[in-house]
Amino acid sequence: MADKSKQSEHNTQAQIGDYSAQVAAFEQAEFSDPFAFLGVHYYNELSVILRVYIPGAEQVFYQSEQQKIAYQRYQKTALFTLILKKSNLQKNYQLSIVYPLITVQETDSYSLASTLDEQAMYLFCEGALAHAYQHLGAQWQRQNNTCGVRFTLWAPNAQCVSVIGDFNHWNATRHLMRKHPSSGVWEIFICNAQAGQGYKFSLLSQDGQRSEKADPFAFVMQMAPATASIIAEQDFATQLNSQHKGLTATQAQDRLIRNSIERPISIYEVHTGSWQRNAEQVAKGESGYLSYQELAERLVPYVKNMGFTHIQLMPISEFPFDGSWGYQPVGMFAPTCRFGSIADFQHLVDACHQQNIGLLIDWVPGHFPSDEHGLAKFDGTHLFEHADKRQGFHPDWQTHIYNYDRGEVKSFLISNAMYWFDLFKIDGLRVDAVASMLYLDYSREDGQWLANEYGGRENLAAIELLKQVNLRCYQENPGIMMTAEESTAWPGVTQYTEHGGLGFGYKWNMGWMNDSLSYMTRDPLYRSHHHHEMTFSLMYAYSENFILPLSHDEVVHGKGSLLNKMPGDDWQKFANLRAYFTLMWAHPGKKLLFMGGEFAQRNEWNHDCSLDWHLLEHGAHQGMQELIKQLNGLYCQSPALYELDNKPTGFQWLDENNAQQSIFSFIRFAKDLTDHIVVVSNMTPNPVQEFRVGVPSHHDYRVIFNSDAENFSGSDFNQQQVLTNQDIAWQGVEHSVCLQLPPLATVYLAKVEQ
């Protein structure tokens, strides 16, 4: 190779002109169109001029297979130029950059044509790019036979945007990006960027304010309080590009079955950071978080042993503040690194599926925090959020509300929902705070909100977004479950979108939760006056596909644990809770229980420490855990308790009006109506020696479950093995049996097959 330290093609300042204005713009990182100046440009009919701006460089060389030619430094600046004959210009030339301590070789980013997919960007702006994460953010690519990262950012109102990171010493003047005016998207390819390096975007607003923002599409982010995005591994890029491979036939069938409305669904809700912690690490003053790998080894077998069918993780998208529990995310596409890598999280998902346990995660499209490195005023304007605080700010949570009217924001959110299914093959999303999205006046007084175009309180753009998210997710991922945490009586939450519904698969039954907990917290002496609180839910039980939730929200902010909500002395507290759980498992609707409830955690949940597993040294807590385990086992084996959850034919009251005794009795039916379970619940501490209950068959009956049983630490009052059928019509059916009804207990009866 020829080394021409002194080029024959003279490169004088007179030839290249006066670049003082351009240099000044680069030095301030204020050059809005760097590709119009840097890289290869026309000089005359025979020659081109090459320009690079490289702070810190001592020398720069043009290098090809045939030659190595020195650039000329412009005055005493970081600008270097080279006039070269067109015939000598090689397409795949490299820059050899000499720094004081090192020489590096790299592709000239400014010599490359854009690889941005303009059709995809059109769809992105229209709100229809369901896989936007494949186009924006930090994408591994190969250009000029060199592997590198293309950084892409939507910031239409920025005056100038740079990528800053470990690969350029966080210098905003080094890698200024190219803007595509039609989409407002900026991009640049950087060949020397490496996996694991941190980066951000430095943005100059139209009013001259500079900010540094994390990548909204980053797949990895630093651990808080650090705020940088991280370049993902190249093998993750391969996984991204092969996401349409989908599930195997067996995996798809398993998912279809376990998430069906006609199947038993018992969900264990988990806060990943406080289910268990490493005691030795905690003693050293460390967080003691279990990793995703350790959760795969401990949590999954525990859930399997306890008989739960699903795990629901509270939000795991990267978030800066532990106290938000993940409900104020800034890295929507990044599984939090608190517990390990992307691969580690995938291992947890796979471990669940190997045990045929569904994995659900909380998803937060309703709001985002105001952290400086996040989405708020992203390019100096209210880009992701509404500018008017009456539309764009949550007074309750002091967070911003997405501008659902913007096509780009819709693409961002739709593609984020799709991302978790595409990449990790999870079973479903539980969408947080849906009511706050649906209503423009949510938690606002008169004058604090703006009506829609028809004068109503409905957020039409948010409604359309939710429909599109559900439609796209279900179309491309059959068998998943999309769940709404919707606290009002909004109609059609789980109706198909083509029938005017929102398109969710399931809805949390917040009414049942509020009413039943209100009843259970009352002294049994007064429960007779509030009997309807336990029966009202059956008035609307089939209006939606419901999940009955006893979630983290019920055991925080001074509400106390489930156990300590119960009235009476310690024995009565446990008896009340056992009776309540057993009644819940028999009520129409799928089940959800927050961690710790299964062994009757005494203290209110604290996200900063582990659950109180030491309580299992005591018999009453062991008994509660055994009750939940056996309830789950019986539930999964009893079609009468789940097959017709959303059909009136699956339920029949025997007596809903026995307020005087505070006793509830009903029948649950399977599709085969001869398969049924009779449920009787006594919500007072008074046993009933001869309680007659109607039964729909001429068979004898037996007690198949008793929340007062000795192995649950109950009094074991009901010792009857077989209940003799009597041809005495009772409670609207032709037959009846008499049983000893225990105090503060719920029992299940099943017919004795002859």
Image (cartoon, grey):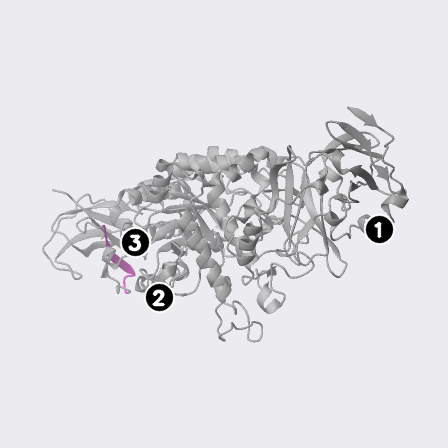
Q: Position of residue 373 (x, y in %)?
A: 67, 51
Q: Earlier in the sequence, mark 2 or mark 3?
A: 2
Crowd band around label 3 with a 10 angstrom C-alpha radius: few (<14), some (14–19), many (20+): many
Span shown in magenta: 660-670
At a point 85% along the width and 52% down the height, the residue shown is: 21
Could you tell me the amino acid type at mark 1? Answer: Ala
271 left or right, relative to 27: left
753, 644: nearer the viewer: 644
332, 537: nearer the viewer: 332
Q: Position of residue 215 (x, y in %)?
A: 63, 48
Q: Is residue 669 magenta?
A: yes
At a point 50% along the width and 64% down the height, the residue shown is: 461
Q: Say what secondary structure mark 1 lies in.
A: helix
What residue is shown with label 1?
Answer: 24
What residue is shown with label 3?
Answer: 645
Could you tell me the amino acid type at mark 3? Answer: Asp
Q: Say what secondary structure mark 2 lies in.
A: helix
Q: Is residue 206 magenta?
A: no
